[in-house]
Image (cartoon, rainbow, N blue to C red):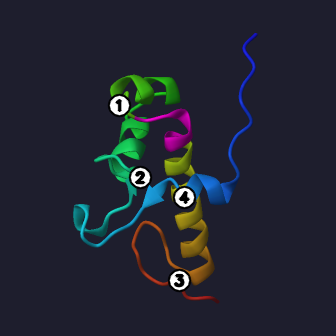
Amino acid sequence: MAVRPMPMDEKTLLGRITVDPKLFGGRPIVQGQAITVEKVLATMVEGASLEEVLEIYPELTRDDVLACLEYARRLIAVMRLKGTDLLSGQRQVSK
């Protein structure tokens, strides 16, 4: 059985993601790559496993893909804290 390397901590993973208004219209990208977080996530939504994503984008590492997932998780958490509905983009009203 192969031993999995310990995952990076959240802060280190997020350091692999770059957001620059001058690059890709400000969309988050994997640092040093011309691949957006959205593209990686879309590939996984289409059914690709982490290993398949690495085959499709050989320039990415396992940690790059995990960083994309962590970025998405953090974005959802921030939207929830702000009371924003993820699907509509509208602020939720508390009852």
Q: Amino acid at mark 1?
A: Tyr
Q: Are marks 3 and 2 in contact (CB under 8 Å)?
A: no
User: In front here: 69 or 6?
Assistant: 6
Residue 15's mark?
4
- What residue is shown with label 2? 31
Q: Amino acid at mark 3?
A: Gln
- In the rendered structure, which disc, 2 or 4, sits on the residue that comes first in sequence? 4
- In the rendered structure, which disc, 1 or 4, sits on the residue that comes first in sequence? 4
At label 1, counting other C-alpha atoms closer than 10 Å, the crowd grade (few under 14, some 14-19, many 20 or more) is few
The answer to whether 18 appears left or right of 23 in the picture is: right
Residue at 37% over, 49% down:
32
Residue at 39% over, 66% down:
19
Which tag is nearer the camera, tag 1 or tag 3? 1
Give above or below for 66 relative to 54: below
**For the image shown, how many numbered marks are present on the structure?**
4
SS state under label 3? loop
Residue 57's mark?
1
Residue 63 highlighted magenta (yes or no): yes
Q: Are marks 2 and 4 in contact (CB under 8 Å)?
A: yes
Residue 29, quarter of picture: bottom left
- Residue 36, how many percent across, how many down? 34, 51
Q: Amino acid at mark 4?
A: Gly
At label 2, counting other C-alpha atoms closer than 10 Å, the crowd grade (few under 14, some 14-19, many 20 or more) is some
The answer to whether 59 appears left or right of 10 in the picture is: left
**What distance separates the C-alpha of mark 1 from that of mark 2?**
14 Å
